[in-house]
Image (cartoon, rainbow, N blue to C red):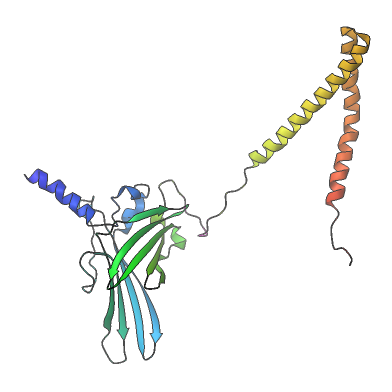
Amino acid sequence: MLHLITPLLLLLARFSMAIDISDEHFSAYPRMKELIGSHLVSRTEETPPSTKKITWYLKITDSGSGSPKDDTFPSECPKDSQLCGLTEISLPNRDPVITEVFSFSNKLTPQFDVNTSSFIVNLRGANWGAYTLDAEIEFVCASDDNAEGLKLVKFDYSTVSLQYKTSSACKSNETPPKDGKNKAPKDDDSNSWGVFTWLFILLVIVMASYIIAQAWINANRVGSSHEFLNELVESIVETLTKLPEFLREIANKLFTSGSRGGYSAV
């Protein structure tokens, strides 16, 4: 009986921990296990005579681990929270008071969006009184020098946007950018060389067609194959003789037109 209960408990645990790196969506990010536990970010606003501070707590779990790390949230957060926000108001000479509690239950099923160097975990439909809240948690692949930890990007009482820049969010075969920016891939020189190669081949084909056609026309006037070979050789020699002058004219036109610039008088 015990061998049937244990897998059932593990299955229930997996469904009760939504941001769970044992989920198949995290399989491409093996270093995410380094983020198991609780993370927080705070933002403070001066609202004289009081001070308003909102703190968001994020829990990342691993139900597939034998000894998962599960740091506890503050007691004000519901026990089933995977993401929790607390608003704290402070007045001079008084103890802080919690005035708002936002909770995203671990029963909410996350949705994943994968980008070039980041992925987003979306949690939708958290209840807050008569309102509904959504959450967007973006994990960005970044080098250790550009890591920022958990950051509150936006909260407008409709959507909370969090961002976590860390090397733990990089794929197994991905190298984080050193300057923290995603650079556009460099142009492949082999591609540009391929264009010139095809142009050269096309030019050779055109020249060969011209030489053969000219020799064939001239040979038809005589009607001898021996004369055709002679005409072909003469056409090749004549074309090669004219080629330098032809290339010189093209170069002059290109460089002459390209050097015209500056300002025009009005």
Q: Which residues are magenta?
A: 175-182
Residue 233 percent location from the top left of the image: 88, 17
Q: Is residue 118 left or right of residue 258?
A: left
Relative vertical location of residue 160 with respect to residue 22 in this rendering, above or below: below
For this orientation, the residue located farthest to the right is 222
Q: Nearer the viewer, residue 4 or 150?
A: 4
The main secondary structure of the magenta stretch is loop
Residue 138 percent location from the top left of the image: 40, 60
Quarter residue 188 falls in: top right
For this orientation, the residue located farthest to the front is 130
Q: Is residue 195 left or right of residue 162?
A: right
Residue 193 among those drawn in magenta: no
Relative vertical location of residue 186 with respect to residue 230 in this rendering, above or below: below
Residue 193 percent location from the top left of the image: 68, 38
- Asked if residue 150 can be seen in this view, the reply is no
Residue 179 among those drawn in magenta: yes
The residue sitting at 18% across, 50% down in the picture is: 10
The residue sitting at 41% across, 56% down in the picture is: 167
For this orientation, the residue located farthest to the left is 1
Quarter residue 245 falls in: top right
Q: Is residue 174 left or right of residue 100?
A: right
For the C terminus, give its image quadrant. Answer: bottom right
Q: Nearer the viewer, residue 158 or 175?
A: 158
For the N terminus, give its image quadrant. Answer: top left
- Asked if residue 196 can be seen in this view, the reply is yes
Quarter residue 200 falls in: top right
The residue sitting at 38% across, 68% down in the picture is: 159
The residue sitting at 43% across, 59% down in the picture is: 144
